[in-house]
Image (cartoon, coloured by chain):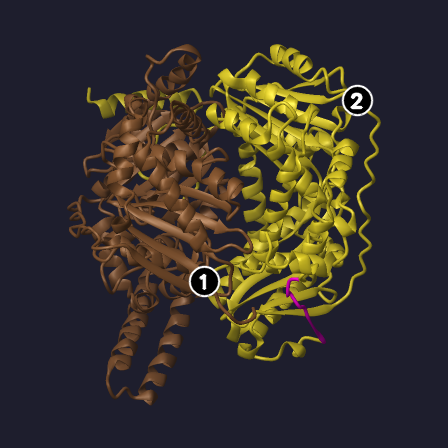
């Protein structure tokens, strides 16, 4: 349940640009003037954008926590916690919490004992069997008090067409889309959720996540964004920084996470000062803030969690790995680059776009059209996350009868060209127009806008930056692109991964 | 007066006028809320015009964003591929785009579009070939020039046809790489028959057999303005846009078109068990079902409710929770012009395969034997009715839906009619519909996995047919070449 979307840079053009662009700027200024923000006493930030075309609203809560915050032993916990956020509270999802609570604790204590016994050098199989039976028994007793999926049902009954959540390396987000007259209902349901969560469904959700891990990673050789290739690319490219482990987490960690672990992690990372909410649609900002104070203001303040300390050092040389699988070849190359809050971030977007986005991109023309060594190519930034220094990625799907090696050689040729000669004025203009269009397309729905507002607030230092970064794209120059290419698109700075088909029959 | 007090006074005054008083105490999440009346939905005006060349146009002005979108639907589709040339429609669509026109070769055309930040795609599916162009408003006319040129003077050059074949062959080589896609594909063949146009897919031999002549014939046969409709949405004046379309497409003249009727589906209810071996699997994908229905069936509304209950309450909530599955669901699908597929599916560890199949079969039986519960019906009905407003959230959604209804000759208010019926569905209705349309004893079961790890042999369910998914190699000349 985590997104595979890769965020593009967000920026807006200046009102000073001429011609038919005036209506673009009007759109953006028009949006900006309809945004209001408010911070609660406990530090939780609220942003509202009014859109009254349809009597609906999209709700978005952004928790500034992702797999990047995880340490050894609890990888995968951010995502597991996201699943468990649908498990209910002291009020929702239970017939009688006072009775259920003791049973949950007893159930978990048995799980602890099982882990302890398993860890012994001379583990007693008989004792283990007894403990497991007792554990299953206690689980069933506790489940008698559970009202399955009550949180989901409550929201769905009110017409929630956008109920969901996702976890990435950088953040966790929770969404809803409801008829706009359900505003207070949403406040009541979701404030309770983040105030009194009970992670009762731990064992079931653990099973589900392990299955998800199997489906997305272990049984998928790959696509670029899923599968073994994805997990190993991060692992190989990041030896220190916590971008090295996948959002889904390591199997062995997932098997051992306890409810206590989840509660501690929740208390640490879901402090209200670490949460940002955005509501976009047919709502009144003053009403929203009043209700937010009333409902979410109840959550006690907690200290803001410490930021990630570890930084990824420079690579000592090019890294390469293979994934052996019953699948066709695939090539991926990742170059280290700075995090999103960097003055050159749009230059990196220009590099990706000009080299690898679209039919007229350099890689498509060279690898797909002319040399015919690939059937598809692409490039993107923001992987596996964007908050911290991360990767600028290129990939190629070799054509039948051609190899990843041929694609890599062709890729290298194109990268050398970008380093030696400046890109053309046409290519730069194309990049700017493509980015402008992408930007507009990304703002179409309430849900999209809510996500963009929270992202800008948390990652870029303020929701206004979504509307204010007008100058930055315009000033990207061919010299900038060449400079960035020469600095970052170098062998020592890259990790290469490929899928190598297994010899035997499928 | 403090701010709070003044609000209280205002709040109660408002109450005297009969409007909901503002709350001061927090409500619990399970309390009953009295919702204020929903603000009204603003429906956009959709203009329908037929051009001189008989092309139908649907236009909606959308001034919120400075863009223009053109969506063109040509009445044809992959079902009209000759059996020995499966892939023809897809290739025609692909090369129409990549080949460009006689004046502007494809690479240049796509480059010009990308220069403008625009996009142009052309894809074939079962029921249409769709050309989709999206541009910044300042390029609306330039884009139309390019699209018109492509439609009126398509080049279909041999080198792009060759390239399309490389891509098709590569897709064929990769088609077993993703287990889920593989399962769906094979299941459709079990339901419709492996030779049915609704299930058949390109092979190396059929791709090789396609010639430039075939592509030109396919194009001329279907790509006529009187066989096409277009929706245009964006930041323009609709009358000006109609004038623009008339002008730019004047050279595209109508010609007699004969679109064969959709191939018939001759379905016979039967029970079968099929198996696809995936030796590297530690999980199985299970699909169980039979033929679905047609959207103009009077039972469509009640079946939507049944389908939702079966999928979310029985498959997902119950089964998936019990077994800790990542997913389980299903749908009784309806087609506009031919019956779609009914299936329930799940993914489970190999060691639970037969157990889960049995549980799924039990659920199918149960829903035809006992009425669904009040809670289940209430949940699905409320979700549908309360969420109805979302069908009108964007102009794009509204006009695309209308275009589809028009394409298939469905009434404009089809959705509203269905909704009214859904509001009135009872438990007895659902049971009757289940008994009429679901046949738990005559289902096709497909399991993709590694039987060596199964909890029991599949044959306990019935005689098993093993499906060989080895990709047929085609002509010797096709192997290991581009």
Quarter of the image for the C terminus of chain A: give it: bottom right
Query: Which colour denotes chain B?
Result: yellow
Give the labeled residue for mark 2.
B254
The magenta-colored residue range is B463-471
Front residue (pair A84, B376): A84
Q: Which residue is mark 1?
A: A500
Residue B185 in which image quadrant:
bottom right
Which sits in the foreground, B274 or B93? B93
B41 inside magenta stretch: no
- What percent of the width, then of the height, locates residue A107? 32, 71
Q: Chain of mark 2?
A: B
Q: Name the residue rendered at 65%, 22% in the picture.
A: B148
Kindly report which numbered mark, 1 or 2, lies closer to the viewer in this rendering.
Answer: 1
Which lettered chain is shown in brown? A
Residue at position x 71%, y 32% in the image? B74
- Pinpoint residue A403: horizontal percent, then vertical percent: 48, 56
Is B160 positioned to the left or the right of A310 in the image? Answer: right
Helix, strand or loop for disc 2 = loop
Query: Crowding near pointer 2: few (<14 within 10 Å), some, many (20+)?
Result: some
Left or right: A410, with B448 as reference point: left
Q: Secondary structure at mark 1?
A: strand
Question: Would residue B96 appear left or right of A322 to someone viewing this image?
Answer: right
- Report x, y in % for residue A244: 28, 56
Considering the whole magenta stretch, tell me its main secondary structure. Answer: loop
In the image, is residue B146 above or below residue A376? above
- Disc 1 to disc 2, C-alpha distance: 52 Å
The quarter of the picture where residue A300 lies is top left
Q: Position of residue B71 (x, y in %)?
A: 62, 28
Q: Is residue A90 visible?
A: no
């Amino acid at each position: 349940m985590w997104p595979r979307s890769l965020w593009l840079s967000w920026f807006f053009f200046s009102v000073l640009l001429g011609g038919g662009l005036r209506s673009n700027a009007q759109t953006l200024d028009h949006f900006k003037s309809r945004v209001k923000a408010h911070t609660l006493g406990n530090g939780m930030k609220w942003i509202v954008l009014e859109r009254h075309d349809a009597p609906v609203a999209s709700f978005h809560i952004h928790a500034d926590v992702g797999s990047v915050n995880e340490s050894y032993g609890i990888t995968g916990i951010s995502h597991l916690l996201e699943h468990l956020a649908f498990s209910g509270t002291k009020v929702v999802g239970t017939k009688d919490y006072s009775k259920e609570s003791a049973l949950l604790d007893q159930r978990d204590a048995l799980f602890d004992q099982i882990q302890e016994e398993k860890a012994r050098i001379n583990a007693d199989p008989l004792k283990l069997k007894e403990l497991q039976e007792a554990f299953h028994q206690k689980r069933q007793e506790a489940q008698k008090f559970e009202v399955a999926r009550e949180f989901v049902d409550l929201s769905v009954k009110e017409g929630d067409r956008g109920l969901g959540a996702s976890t990435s390396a950088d953040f966790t987000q929770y969404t809803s889309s409801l008829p706009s007259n359900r505003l207070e209902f949403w406040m009541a349901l979701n404030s309770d959720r983040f105030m009194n969560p009970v992670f009762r469904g731990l064992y079931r959700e653990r099973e589900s996540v392990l299955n998800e891990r199997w489906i997305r990673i272990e049984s998928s050789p790959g696509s670029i964004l899923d599968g073994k290739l994805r997990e190993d690319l991060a692992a190989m490219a990041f030896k220190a920084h916590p971008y090295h482990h996948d959002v889904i987490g390591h199997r062995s960690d997932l098997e051992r996470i306890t409810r206590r672990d989840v509660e501690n992690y929740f208390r640490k990372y879901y402090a209200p000062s670490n949460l940002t909410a955005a509501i976009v649609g047919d709502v009144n900002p003053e009403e929203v803030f009043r209700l937010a104070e009333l409902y979410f203001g109840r959550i006690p303040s907690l200290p803001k969690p410490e930021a990630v300390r570890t930084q990824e050092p420079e690579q000592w040389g090019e890294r390469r790995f293979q994934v052996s699988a019953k699948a066709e070849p695939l090539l991926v190359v990742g170059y280290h680059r700075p995090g999103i809050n960097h003055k050159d971030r749009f230059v990196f977007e220009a590099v990706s776009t000009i080299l690898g986005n679209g039919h007229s991109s350099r890689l498509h023309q060279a690898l797909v059209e002319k040399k015919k060594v690939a059937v598809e190519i692409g490039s993107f930034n923001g992987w596996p996350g964007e908050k911290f220094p991360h990767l600028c990625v290129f990939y190629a799907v070799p054509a039948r009868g051609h190899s990843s090696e041929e694609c890599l050689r062709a890729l290298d040729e194109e990268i050398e060209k970008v380093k030696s000669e400046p890109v053309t004025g046409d290519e730069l203009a194309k990049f700017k127009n493509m980015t402008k269009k992408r930007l507009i397309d990304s703002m179409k729905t309430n849900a999209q806008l809510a996500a963009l507002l929270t992202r800008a607030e948390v990652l870029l230092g303020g929701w206004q930056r979504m509307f204010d970064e007008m100058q930055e794209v315009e000033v990207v120059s061919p010299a900038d692109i060449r400079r960035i290419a020469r600095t970052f698109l170098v062998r020592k700075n890259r990790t290469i991964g490929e899928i190598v088909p297994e010899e035997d029959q499928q | 007066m403090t701010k709070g007090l003044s609000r209280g006074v205002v709040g109660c005054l408002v109450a005297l006028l009969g409007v909901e008083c503002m709350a001061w105490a927090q409500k619990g999440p399970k309390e009953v809320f009295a919702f204020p009346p929903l603000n009204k939905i603003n429906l956009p005006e959709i203009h329908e015009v037929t051009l001189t060349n008989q092309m139908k146009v649907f236009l909606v002005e959308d001034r919120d964003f400075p863009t223009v979108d053109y969506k063109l639907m040509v009445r044809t589709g992959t079902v009209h591929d000759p059996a020995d040339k499966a892939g023809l429609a897809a290739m025609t669509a692909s090369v129409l785009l990549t080949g460009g026109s006689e004046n502007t070769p494809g690479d240049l055309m796509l480059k010009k579009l990308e220069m403008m930040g625009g996009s142009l795609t052309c894809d074939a599916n079962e029921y249409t070939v769709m050309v989709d162009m999206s541009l910044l408003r300042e390029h609306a006319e330039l884009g139309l020039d390019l699209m018109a040129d492509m439609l009126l003077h398509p080049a279909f050059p041999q080198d792009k046809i060759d390239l399309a074949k490389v891509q098709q062959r590569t897709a064929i080589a990769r088609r077993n790489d993703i287990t889920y896609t593989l399962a769906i594909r094979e299941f459709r063949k079990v339901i419709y028959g492996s030779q049915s146009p609704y299930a058949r897919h390109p092979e190396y031999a059929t791709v090789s057999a396609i010639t430039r002549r075939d592509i030109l014939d396919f194009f001329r046969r279907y790509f006529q303005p009187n066989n096409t409709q277009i929706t245009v949405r964006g930041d323009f004046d609709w009358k000006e846009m109609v004038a623009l379309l008339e002008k730019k497409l004047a050279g595209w003249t109508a010609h007699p078109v004969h679109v064969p009727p959709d191939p018939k589906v001759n379905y016979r209810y039967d029970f079968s068990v099929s198996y696809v071996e995936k030796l590297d699997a530690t999980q199985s994908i299970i699909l169980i079902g039979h033929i679905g229905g047609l959207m103009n069936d009077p039972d469509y509304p009640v079946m939507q409710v049944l389908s939702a209950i079966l999928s979310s309450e029985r498959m997902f909530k119950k089964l998936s929770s019990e077994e800790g599955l990542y997913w389980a669901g299903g749908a009784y699908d309806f087609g506009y012009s031919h019956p779609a597929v009914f299936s329930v599916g799940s993914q489970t560890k190999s060691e639970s395969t037969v157990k889960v199949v049995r549980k799924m079969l039990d659920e199918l039986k149960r829903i035809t034997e006992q009425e669904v519960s009040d809670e289940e019906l209430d949940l699905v009905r409320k979700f549908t009715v309360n969420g109805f407003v979302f069908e009108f959230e964007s102009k794009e959604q509204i006009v695309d839906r209308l275009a589809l209804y028009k394409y298939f000759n469905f009434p404009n208010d089809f959705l509203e009619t269905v909704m009214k019926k859904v509001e009135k569905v009872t438990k007895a209705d659902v049971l009757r519909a289940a008994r009429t349309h679901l046949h738990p004893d005559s289902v096709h079961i497909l399991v993709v996995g590694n039987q060596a790890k199964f909890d029991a042999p599949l044959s306990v369910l019935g005689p098993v047919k093993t499906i060989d998914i080895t990709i047929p190699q085609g002509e010797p000349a096709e192997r290991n070449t581009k």
